[in-house]
Every structure is written in C-alpha cells, then in structure tokens.
Image (cartoon, coloured by chain):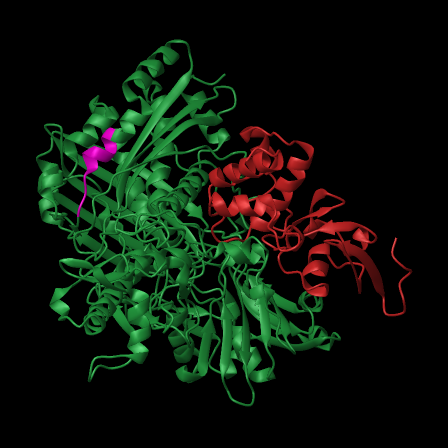
Amino acid sequence: MTQVASESGLHTVEVTVNGTPRAAAVEARVLLVHFLRQSLGLTGTHIGCDTSSCGACTVLVEGVPVKSCTMFAVQAHGASITTVEGLAAGGQLHPIQQAFHEQHGLQCGFCTPGMMLTSVALLAENPSPTDEEIRWALSGQICRCTGYQNIVKAVQQAAAELRGES
Amino acid sequence: MTTKEIGGLGHSVKRKEDARFIRGKGQYFDDIVLPGMLHMEILRSPFAHARIRSIDTSAAAALPGVVAVVTGELMAQHNLAWMPTLSGDTQAVLATDKVRYQGQEVACVVAESPYVAKDALELIEVDYEPLAAVTSPQQAMAPGAPLIRDEKENQEDNHVYHWEAGDKETTDRAFAEADRVISLETFYPRCHPAPLECCGCIADVNPATGKATIYLTSQAPHAHRTLFAIVAGLPEQQIRIISPDIGGGFGNKVPIYPGYVVATAASLLLGRPVKWVEDRTGNLISTGFARDYHMRGELAVKDGKMTGLRATLLSDQGAFYADAQPTKFRAGLFHIVTGSYDIPAAHVVADGYYTNKAPGGVAYRCSFRVTEASYLIERLVDNAAHELGVDPAKFRLDNFVRPEQFPYRSATGFLYDSGNYPEAMRIALEKLGYEELRREQAEARAQGRLLGIGLASFTEVVGAGHGKEYDIAGLRMFDSAELRVHPTGKAILKLGVKSQGQGHETTFAQIVAEELGIPYDDIEVQEGDTDNTPYGLGTYASRSTPVAGAATAVIARKLREKAKAIAAHLLEVSPEDVEFEAGRFFVRGAPERAKTIQDVAFASYTNLPEGMEAGLEGVHYYDPPNMTFPFGTYAVVVEIDRGTGQWKVRKVVAVDDCGTRINPTIVEGQITGGLTEGYAIAAMELITFDEEGNCIGSNFMDYLIPTAWETPEFELGEVVTPSPHHPLGAKGVGESATVGSPAAYVNAVIDALWHAGVTNIDMPLTPDKVWAALNEVGLAE
C-alpha cells in the first residue's frame, strides 16, 4: 500500500522501472499508464483505446503483461515494472527488438512496444512456442498496420536467438 | 540497378525509421510536452438530433484548475462556430442551434490537467430538446423527414448531391439487347479506419510573435496549413504545422476536426499551448468514418460477355458533407466500377443524403470510394457467374481487359495504364490448386460440409492526380520532392507527403539511392514540417509513390545531369563522354577513369566548372499525367460451421501488381495489413445506429478488430507490369488489399452456400447472420 494520503490527497507511488527506482506523487485515481507517461516521462507506452481492448499500453509488472490503462498507479506501488525503454541493455538491443526490425514486424510503431513486451513474457514462459501459441499470447493486442504475420515471424526469430540457435 | 549496400529499387532493405520505434522513442504528438501546456477535453452530445435550449458552463468554469470553457456561442463571436469542409459544405465546430449527431462536439474545457478537464465536462449542463433522428438515406429522403440542415440557406430537404458518370443511353441500349441481366442489391456498412493512435493536436500560438505552431495528426500538413489560414484567419506564413510520428492514418487523419480548431482558438485566446488528445470513443463516434453506401448493381450479359453495367448509389453522408476527396468527383472514384473487365457501356448514378450521424464517408484505405466500387463489381461478377452456371474464374478470364488492349479507355473515362489480369489470375489459381479445390468442394458438399472459394480480381485507381482534374479544396494534387546533396556526399530529401507507417524514410531514400548511387542509409528523409518541406497534398489514396515518388525520381535525375557535368569537369572530358552507373561517373571506353557521386558532391561546393552555380540540389513539383492502376486477384477458401455460422478462413492467396516494387518486403507488409482490414470488414467491423440515432460501435468492445488470433495467414504472389507513364514504373499499393479483398471473403462464403439458394449476405458476415442464412435454406444444424 502507498503512504497514507497527505493533505494534498496525493499518494507517493514508488516503483522500480527498468531497474531504476522512481517515484512520484499522484491522485489515487491516476492510471498507471498516465503515471508512466506523464509523471515519469516514459512515453514509449501508448494509449490506443478507452475500454482495455487494444493493449497498446501493455507493460510488464513483475514480469507479467498488464494493460497499464486498467491499473491504478497506486496499485503498482512497490512493484518492478518493465517498459519498452527497458528492453535494450547497455546500448544493445534485445533480441525481440532486433527481430521486429529484421522481420518488418512494425509499420507505424504504435502497437510495437506492447507487442514486444508481451512477446518477451511469452518467451520467458515458453521458449519454443508454435505460431498458434504466439498468436494466442498476442490476442489481447491490436495492430492495424501489419496483419500480424511478420510479428509472428519476429517472435519466432527472437525465440531462436534466445534459445541460442542463431 | 544497385548493390544491396546502396539499396536502390528492388532491395528489401531494413527500415531506417525502426530505430526509434523499437526503442519506444517515437515522437507521436501526445509524447510532446510544452512548457505551460494546457489540456482540452470535448463535451459531446448524447443525442443524435436535438435543439440546444441552453448551456450552463458556470460550475465547470469554477472548478479549480479549469482555465476556460468554450462553447459554440464563444466561437461564433470569432466567426469560428462553423467551418468549411473539404467537400464545399460547412460543418459545426461547436454546436450552436442544434446537435446533429450523437457525439457531436458541444463544448470544450481547457484545464491545467487532463483529469481536471474531464471532471469539468461533467459539470457542464446542457438543456436539450430531442428531435426525431434520421438514420438512413431512405429515411432522409422520405416525405416529411426531419430537416437536418435547417440552418443552411436554400436547403429544403436532406439531399446533398446528385452525380453521374458514364453514359445512360449506350448503357440502356446494352441492357435492352442483353440476353441476361444479373442484379445485386448490397450495402457496404459503415466502418472506421480506427488507427491505433487517435487524433489530436498541440496548438501553440506564441503570444509575443503570433506564430502558431501546431503539432497535428495530419496526413496532409500543407493543405491543413492553408485551410487553417483560411478558416482561422491566421497569416499563413505564421502557421507551422508539424505532423510528427503518426500511429496509423488510413484516411482518418485527412479531415480537419473541430477539436483542432477549438484548440487553436483556445491557444490564441489564452496565450498558452493547448493539447487535445482524442479518446477512442470520440474517434469512433465523430471522426471520418468510411463507406455507409447502399448500392444496386446490374450487369448485362450477352453470349457470355459483359456488355453493360449500371450502378445506383445512395450515400449516407452524415450530418455534414465532409468527404475527403477530389472536389470534381462527388462519389469519389467510384466510376472505376467496371474494374478489370472490358465492359463497353456503363452508367453510374449517385445521390448523397444527410443523416444524423457523424460526417465523412471517404476513408479507410478506400482510394476515394474504390473500395465500394470494387466490392460491388466483384460481388456482382461472382453472382453472375453462378447464375449463368459458369465457373467464376473462367467468367472473369473471358471478360478481362486483355494485355494487348492497354492503355485501355474504360466506359467511364479512365485510361488504364498497364496490366496483365490473366497472369494474376493464373498465378492465384495455381497457388490455390484451384481444380483440386473445386473437386474437394464437391466431395465436401456430398458429406454435408460447406467449403467455399471466393475470387476477386480488382483493378483500382490511385495516384491523384493530374491538376486539371484532381484538386482538394481547390489545391491541385501535384506533389513534391526537394533534394540536397551535402559536401560529404550525404543527402537530405524533403517531401510534400507524410508517412503514417508506410516507411517513406526508407523507400524514398531508396529512390534517390537508385538514381544517384548514394547509399540509402546516407539519405535523410524529412516529412511533415510545413516550415521545412515543399508543398504537397499529403499521403492518402495511395498517392505517395505515384506522385511524390515520381517527383523524387525527376529531381534526382536533374541532379544527376548536373553531377555528370561536374564529373566531366573533374575527369577533364566532355559530359557526353561520361556514363553513370550505381554512383560512379566514368569515361566511356575507359571505366577505370571514374569519379564517385561523393567526389562530385564535394566538388559541387569546392571545384566547379566556370560559371556553374554551386551546390547539388533542387526541388520538383510533379503533376502526374494520369492515374495509376494497381490490380490483382485474391482468392479465399473458407469452411462454414453449420452449427454456429462461423466461417474459418482456410487459405488466402493474394497476387498483386503494383508495378515496380521499390522495397518488396515493405510492399508485402502493406498488402498483409490490407488483407487483414479486408477480413475485418467482411467479418466483424460495424458501426450501426438504433432508431434514436444512438451509435453502436463507438468503442473497441463493440467495434471489433481482429487480433493475431482471428487473423488468417496470407500467401502472396506478384505480377509486375510497370506503369508506362511513371518515371519508376511504380503504381502505389497501400490500399490494394483493403480495396480488393472484402469481396473475396464474402464471395467465398456465398460460394459455399449458393447451391442451397443463398445469393447474398451483407457485411459484416457475423456468425448470427450466416447462421440465419443457413437456417433459411435448411442448412443449419
């Protein structure tokens, strides 16, 4: 739980984002996605709808894909969050980023952060998914540009790379 | 031809723009924060049709953190309550007398934070007097129908326009002499481009300088700048539109929306930047929808040949006529409706009507109503083949425009540039294993299984367009490319078009790479900032490659001529003796005596022939001589579940011809994206209205978009017939699959059911509708 609200009605939310401790004071009703984008200035997480349907806002909370528009920032207090900005390490792209690039898995780029994060979570749990399993794992996310075919190929490429096969 | 490292035409080089997107470092407008920025939210009408008796904003204005509440009355004081549309009508910016569709903008709150702005919306009290709503053209034209545009002078009914193409007399004669006439009534339902990023802007009118910088989700920034100048009365040299990274457009980001105008007015009045971020409900309920087109098609056939085509259209225009299309064409380019067939006589009659719905109609990768036309002809042709007892592939092959007929003048006046329709069909049938599939279909039918094969052989028309015929709000539809080569041999290319995911930063660099031999990675492409790019009409209707791509090739070739002269000077020969290949200028007959384009670039600033102007740069505004005509054959195989009405797509084969392919992988990406939209439209996308005008389909719970789970896999093939009039032979491809594929999906389902007497089901073919059709003919389980 967050600190008891001060007179201002704000709660100090402390999280670890991409390995770095961050904190900001927000109203209880502030959504996690707004906390990330506005309070923490991490604009790689996007907003595409208002009914929890599109998944553009997907981040990993304790490694689990979560639609950050459907979670309050205060609910994330104390949690470890991964956003797209945390995928590359030490200037090196994560295999999923490299794969999306090499397989033409993105066009406008708006759904891409969410797609990559969910894929990373999938591969952590299932290092050798079938195409069907990939499609099922990504079925909470909408892309309007690609038709998904190259996204599936990208995830397969990243999977092979992570298995040490390429 | 160039090496892969240079990356000219035909190379599937990796995209340059990916670098920021995969890192989450894209700059979409909502990512931008300006000092002192305020936030705007829009209050929308809950009623489809109602008089506004009063609006009380006092409680909202008093909420701490609220800076201003704007109503139509306030906008009217600045002559901004109404604005012109792209179709010559007027549209309310904020409602004054009436609201005319559910979701219409009624008031705006500007506040220190978006949460406070949203809070304030709930405190605005509007006293509405509901009126009867009109929700279809049929209702709109009925005697005694409510008059929607009662504020408009000389508007006595709900009729918007009447438009015709082709020739009535020759068509009537063809029908009189036909031995068979096949007809089809079909409705292309209202759907929506729904790009993943909604619309919005940051309007920043600097109070000290008067300069207006507007970050805008705009597919056409220059046109928007000019329209802003005219509508808002701001001096055009003081307006800078910056269209940053856009998360999908699909035509949704072509119109000027009330939110942009109010945000700009608010910034002007308040002296601070104002950001407006649309939410998904606002996007679906109020921005440029697509289609909503009632169509009747009739095909005259004599001795197995198509001899005449009639199309009668009723267009639902919503409350304001705001189609984003070339002004001389009230029904867009619908008259491409003879499609891939050699039909000597055709007549199109179109009427548009106002209804109590959001304005729009021309959007969603439609190539200006070509989606509607292509759907009609491909459904009609399939039905005709079934009625005549002819195989649908054969019926098409027998009636295709033949390769030797190009350039082909259609019955409605288009001059098709190039094509090889039989080849696209041949490849599609081969990939399908068509003969075997028809056998399998017959066997399955005997076992009580419903397999269907749907074909669609579309020809579409893009690349608007030649200035005399094509203009948007009077602005001729040329486009532009400004190319500058730097001393160190790198280059910058600035364009009048604006990518929303199509990969221009890569593909347009590839054009320059082809023409000048500068590696594509050394070429920076800029779009979207009107202060820093040449004037263009923007990206929609698949026009970027045909028009701006041509401009790029032309200017690159002009620079190459100058480069040749500089190379000759460096090589101490005359320019006639210099040849060029892939970035090298060499002496004819002595190829080892050469200078690279990089050498020439440096020399253009340091060592010029006497009297020659320094630099290596230029700009070209290209006026296309004709449109281009991409085409293809798509084939879909489905199996229908008799118990649920669900249809599963077993196979999709798509053979496309878009002329020369600059980057084959990017072309294929455009096609798979379009095939997915086509599937979505055929299967599930729908915006509809109840009798009170309540919009059903104004959020993603109701407006269904397929995810990776629902979306089929696609097998692609290609034909290449270069466009003879385009400098690169390229035609454009962005919309081909959205245009051509819906009919293929629907034809597949109807093909599975024709034998039982089902001749049509209107889109979307949801399971309940398919099951109802099955049930009616005794096929339901």
> Is residue A68 rendered to the left or right of residue B280?
right
Residue B625 found in image quarter: bottom left
Q: Find residue A142 and report its horizontal and vertical position in percent.
A: 55, 44
Residue B611 found in image quarter: bottom left
> Is residue B679 rendered to the left or right of residue B462?
right
Question: Looking at the image, which residue is at 19% across and 43% down?
Answer: B419
Question: Looking at the image, which residue is at 81% across and 59% down?
Answer: A28
Q: Is residue B399 above or below residue B642?
A: below
Considering every residue shown, the one lying at the far bottom of the view is B208
Where are the magenta residues, as a range?
B418-426
Q: Is residue B385 above or below residue A5?
A: above
Of residues B129 and B587, the one drawn nearer to the viewer in this rendering:
B587
Question: Looking at the image, which residue is at 56% across and 58% down?
Answer: B282
Of residues B760 and B116, the one drawn nearer to the viewer in this rendering:
B116
Of residues B202 and B547, the one drawn nearer to the viewer in this rendering:
B547
Q: Is residue B694 magenta?
A: no
> Is residue B61 rendered to the left or right of residue B157?
right
Residue A131 in sight in this render: yes
Q: Find residue B560 and report its horizontal and vertical position in percent.
A: 23, 66
Of residues B188 and B631, the one drawn nearer to the viewer in this rendering:
B631
Chain A: give its colour: red
Q: Find residue A53 and report its horizontal and vertical position in percent.
A: 61, 45
Q: Find residue B460 and report its horizontal and vertical position in percent.
A: 26, 47
Chain B: give its colour: green
Residue B72 in sight in this render: no
**Total numbered badges shown on the rendered structure:** 0
Q: Name the magenta segment's main secondary structure.
A: helix
